[in-house]
Structures are given as C-alpha cells and as structure tokens.
Amino acid sequence: MTGYRISWNDRQLVMHGRTLIMGILNITPDSFSDGGRFEDPESAIAQAEKLVADGADILDIGGESTRPFSDPVPAAVEIERTAPVIQALAGRINVPISIDTTKAKVAEAALAAGASIINDISALQMDPQMASVAADAGVPVILMHMQGNPKTMQEAPAYEDVTREVVDFLADAAQTAEENGIARERVIVDPGIGFGKTVDHNLTLIHNLHRFRRLNLPLLVGPSRKAFIRKTLAGSGDDTLPADSPEVIAGTQAVVAASVLGGAHIIRVHDVAAARITLMLADAIKNAPE
C-alpha cells in the first residue's frame, strides 16, 4: 500500500499499512439508507459516538441527501441540521469531522463549529467560493467525480471508458484545487461510486481501482449499501433489495474488501463495526509478504 500522511492544524490522517474508516452520519429526512433516523440532534450525537466507538477514523456529517433524483436544500437548512451537532461533537470525540456539502456557506459554518475536512461531491464545481473556503482554512478536501448532479445523474449515465474518464477528471480537479490555493498534500480523491454510473460502470471502477495510483493521491471509496450492490444481489432486471437488508450489508463488505485490495486508503461506510473486521483481514492480506 502506498502510504500517505495528511497533517493540518492539530490533526493528522496516517494512511499506511491500515485502511481508514469514514463513518457516515446523515442528518436528513430522505437519504437512501438511513434517512429520518438521525434527524434530531440527540439521536445524531448518539449515532456519531457509536460510529467512533465502533472504530471510525473520520466522521462524515451531511445535511442534504445526494441520493439519485433527490432535490437540493437551501444552505440555511443544511447549517441548521449539521452545525449544532458538529459543535456538540467537537469536544466529545477524538476523530476529525468531515462536512459533506457542496456549499461554501455550509462548509464555513461547519468549520466554525468544529469540522476540519470538506467532502465535496462536486469537486469544488457547484460553488465557486468553496475552493477559497478550503484554502483559507487549510483543511483537507475530498474531491469526488459525479456525472451530472444528484437530481439527474442516474437518468442516462454514459462513458466511452469510465475508468479513464474518472481518473482524468480527478487529475484535473486536483490540479484546479492546487491552482486555487489548496495544498496538494491535503487533497483526497473519490471515484464517486453510484454517482452518475450504471451497475457495470461501478463494477468496472472497483475492478480498476489500481489505475487511480497514477494520481499519487489518497483514494477514498464509498460503496456502502449502494444501488449497484442491491441490484447485483437481486439478480436481474430492475429488481433491487432494501438498503438495510442483511444481504446488502454483507454484500457491502465484499466490495469493501475488493476496494482495499484494489488500492483504497479510506472506506466510507454506514456499518463501521462490520467494516473494521473486514479491513483487519483485507489489510492483513494486502500487507502479507510475497
């Protein structure tokens, strides 16, 4: 495993020998897997503490669903949902908090509340102020590939060579971030599993994760409970399984293991405890002598 270390303020992420886990906390009424479960601050804080206790190295908090065909929400709503929870958690957990947003105002409010990573599924493209917010704060930024936007991305995703096009996009996104004052050593890239991709596109990207090594950047993969897993396990046609079904939870772990063996440095998941066990074995296999 190629190793990386990201240091900023009083934080650091060490990605060498062990794959890191990003735990997902959606404070939304309509996320595809856990929408509505953690809307009130008390339940959100309790879930966050559970994710950390289960082994999360990063806590990713979002206040807007980005599931396929979802509608955007105003920045004020995102801030109202996320900032109080981040502020409550900042002094209670010992792992960095990431804000999952495409809006600079939301990122600013989250950073002020105690977050220290920006996870932007638009790779800084949806809000022209996001790059300067990240650069001024000196925090790590996760840049993700998405074809279209959450409302339209699954209508008819098409590529000539999905892996090449996603790698090229992320190379350009990282260069743009650097040109806007974001240090390259604080950039993490994400191929955007499930964002503007068919089942075959997602399977191909997982199969070809080794091709992202040419970027020489930490790689985050977020396959957790995604539709390509649900559809593959359902077997045929347009059938799909519920996101929280035992089959999908188990299937996610298979993709987690494949992602690690393919070169992922961070895995973004709902089920942190299960992922921690999977990663212990996947990392042991990956790091075994030849």
Image (cartoon, rainbow, N blue to C red):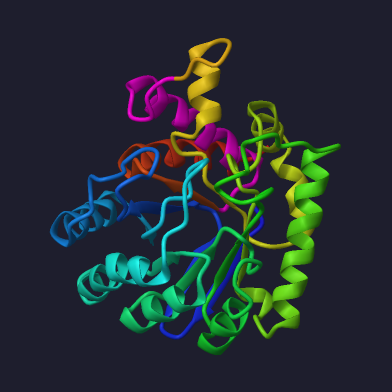
Name, please, the residue furthest toward the left. 42
Q: Magenta residues, as a range?
A: 241-265
Q: Of 259 and 17, which appears nearest the observer?
A: 259
Who's the residue at 38% across and 44% down the image? 31
Residue at image position (41%, 57%) is: 64
- Residue at the spot 66% in from the left edge and 81% down from the top edge: 183
Residue 282 relative to residue 171: left or right: left
Residue 77 shown left or right of residue 140 in the figure? left
Q: Is residue 109 above or below residue 247?
A: below
Locate residue 115: give its quadrant. bottom left
Q: Which x, y percent locates residue 110?
A: 37, 75
From the top left corner, tell me how far across and down residue 53 is, in percent. Answer: 23, 54
Residue 129 forms part of the magenta stretch:
no
Q: Is residue 101 above or below residue 223?
A: below
Answer above or below: position of 222 versus 144.
above
Which one is nearer the viewer's eye here, 274 or 170?
A: 170
Could you tell me residue 57's position as x and y percent? 39, 59
Q: Quadrant of the C terminus?
A: top right
Q: Is residue 288 at all visible to an observer of this figure? A: no
Between 116 and 216, the one lying in front of the other is: 116
Q: Position of residue 219 (x, y in %)?
A: 62, 55
Q: Residue furthest top?
A: 236
